[in-house]
Amino acid sequence: DSGVTQTPKHLITATGQRVTLRCSPRSGDLSVYWYQQSLDQGLQFLIQYYNGEERAKGNILERFSAQQFPDLHSELNLSSLELGDSALYFCASSVGPDTQYFGPGTRLTVL
Amino acid sequence: GEDVEQSLFLSVREGDSSVINCTYTDSSSTYLYWYKQEPGAGLQLLTYIFSNMDMKQDQRLTVLLNKKDKHLSLRIADTQTGDSAIYFCAEFILTGGGNKLTFGTGTQLKVEL
């Protein structure tokens, strides 16, 4: 158990819908990262937050947004969902730059 | 560039050593990592190496880093069936005011009896 929690574990929704994925980092970790894992793209970095501020952005679609709250938990919002958004979404946290610990992931299925 | 490459499959017999290889392209990477992913599970951090090191050993795991050739390897001694999983190498990249990990495609390790 990495100490990073993600909810929900599974999510099934329809095209055009909007969903919110939630992540609680390890106690004391200020950085939160979001990654997407899909069969065609592999593991891709989406976005990083540090202590509530966006720090780095990857190949995140404009339909996707994220935020980190004062209690350091983070949410990833996915809107106007398409079939191709079906993937495993991971959250990771770190206290320093050297190690990222990953949560169990949220499996999103868009029908 | 930020490409990390790995071979897709490796099959070994139980008790043998496994060697999983990775090449990366960003010479400024300060940390390189190995993660393990079992079916239906998240990414488990196995070990990492700082770029000024050539080797790191942690129980059955040995990481070798050839910075000149940008080559990283993970050796698992006495491989067990429980080691069957996908192994990802990743490099630490500074980007903008933050950082990220760039992952390889993953190597599926199959351990046969």
Image: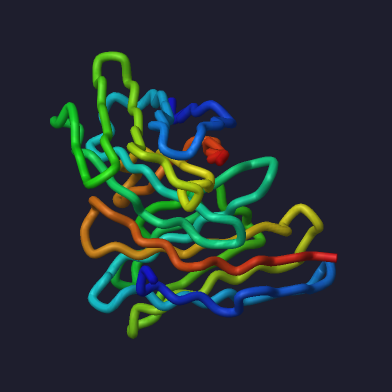
Say above or below: B47 vs A30.
above
* Residue in front for this viewpoint, B43 or A83: B43
Q: Quadrant of residue A3?
A: bottom left
* B53 sits left or right of A56 in the view: left
Q: Could you tell me residue B56's position as x and y percent?
A: 19, 37
Task: Name the side, left or right, on which A97 lies relative to B16.
Answer: left
Q: Please state, as top left, top right, bottom left or bottom right, where the N terminus of chain B lies in the image.
A: top left
Query: According to the image, what is the colour scheme of the structure?
Result: rainbow
| Residue found 52% across the figure and 46% down from its top | B84
Report the number of numbered marks. 0
Q: Position of residue B90 (x, y in %)?
A: 39, 40
Q: Quadrant of residue B39?
A: bottom right
Of residue A93 and residue B13, the one placed in the foreground of this image is B13
Q: Residue visible at 50% across and 28% down?
A: B6
Q: Residue furthest top?
A: B69
Q: Does A47 sit above or below residue B22?
A: below
B52 in relation to B35, above or below: above
Is residue A21 found left or right of B6 in the rendered image?
A: right
The residue positioned farthest toward the left in the image shown: B52
Nearer to me, A32 or A107: A107
* Front in this rendered view, residue A87 or B54: B54
Location of residue B26 in the rendering, given as x and y in whole percent from the top left corner: 34, 27
User: On the rendered image, what quadrant is the C terminus of chain B found in?
Assistant: top right
Residue A71, horizontal then vertical, whole percent: 34, 85
Instruction: Write the residue at 44% across / 46% down.
Output: B80
Q: Is residue A28 left or right of residue A39?
A: left
